[in-house]
Image: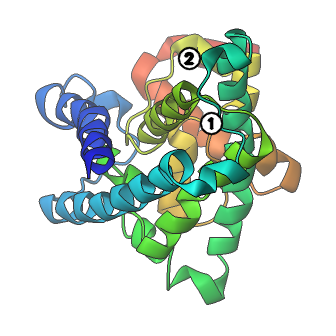
Amino acid sequence: MRLFGVSAVRYFVIAGVPFILFYKLLSNWFSQSKIQNRNAGIKDFVREVLHSMQSTAVFAVIGYLVLFTPLQRYTQVYTDINAYPVWWIAVSLILSLIIHDTYFYWMHRLLHHKKLFRYTHLVHHQSTNPSPWTSYSFHILEACVEGGVLFVVAILMPLHPITIVLFTVVGFMINVYGHLGYEVAPQGFRHTVLFEVLNTSVHHNLHHSKFKGNYGLYFRVWDRLMGTEHPDYVKEYDRIQQKRFGKAVDEVIKAV
């Protein structure tokens, strides 16, 4: 219960603060950054929060199993921080995110199979116009599969509990950005190498509105390699940025 409580607080803080800022306090300020013109309603938010609490409970159980039960002996979780160099915490975090993205991409494509979608992933796609509350809004079976990545990562490489905490927090923050419903990437991001690699809020928002393509979580890599990136992604991203920055973006696009 303590682990669930901590996880629930994390959910309401990391998802709640952006929601309050973008959807309540500063909605007019960020109006040009909104990806879809329509608005989700209170019923959508309540449904998403309830499903997210269910998912949070599942994730808490998985975390407990990995950290505090005999199952830990089948993983490479270590508690002596001196067992590996301190820099390994940062490196293992980055590797964990890369593994997670690969795991998520193929799991996500599988859940879109017509024989599985309606029984699992449809719950998440009820949010055709996602908000920060959507980030953990999963069917209980999908939550089990989603949370299973922690077992995979902990079996594949040594992880200190600090890395596990950072992995869950950083991963969730990126997840919230993907479901934000607003694009906040800086103006110059479009013509950097990072744009070719990293997902944006527009990238995942297209997946929710179109239901196909853009299956990656953190990176564009698998979508581009497998030809599953939505063909309108870059055009849609440029449209939103043009709304935000006007002529400055037009000049950048022409230069590219």
Q: Tag 1: Cα neighbours inside 10 Å, few (<14), some, or many (≥20)?
A: many
Residue closest to the eye, 8 or 226: 8
Q: Position of residue 38 (x, y in %)?
A: 28, 54
Q: Which residue is mark 2?
A: 249
Residue closest to the eye, 201 or 75: 75
Q: Is residue 140 left or right of residue 90?
A: left
Residue closest to the eye, 236 or 202: 202
Confirm whether residue 229 shows in the render: no
User: Which badge, 1 or 2, comes first in the chain's sequence?
Assistant: 1
The quarter in which the C terminus is drawn is top right
Q: Tell me the residue at 60%/59% (across/down).
A: 148
Q: Tag 2: Cα neighbours inside 10 Å, few (<14), some, or many (≥20)?
A: many
C-alpha separation, residue under disc 1 versus residue under disc 2: 19 Å
Q: Tell me the residue at 41%/62% (across/down).
A: 58
Q: Is residue 135 above or below residue 28?
A: below
Q: Is residue 153 above or below residue 10?
A: below
Confirm whether residue 111 shows in the render: yes
Q: Nearer the viewer, mark 1 or mark 2?
A: 1
Direction right: furthest residue:
225
Q: Element at badge 1?
A: loop
Q: Quadrant of residue 23?
A: top left
- Indicate which disc residue 199 carries: 1
**Amino acid type at mark 2:** Val
Q: Quadrant of residue 115?
A: bottom right
Q: Position of residue 182 (x, y in %)?
A: 38, 35
Q: Is residue 183 left or right of residue 106?
A: left
Q: Tell me the residue at 66%/36% (across/down).
A: 97
Q: Position of residue 101 (x, y in %)?
A: 69, 45
**What is the total number of numbered labels drawn onto the structure image?**
2
Q: Position of residue 225 (x, y in %)?
A: 87, 48
Q: Tell me the residue at 37%/30% (across/down).
A: 33
**Amino acid type at mark 1:** Asn
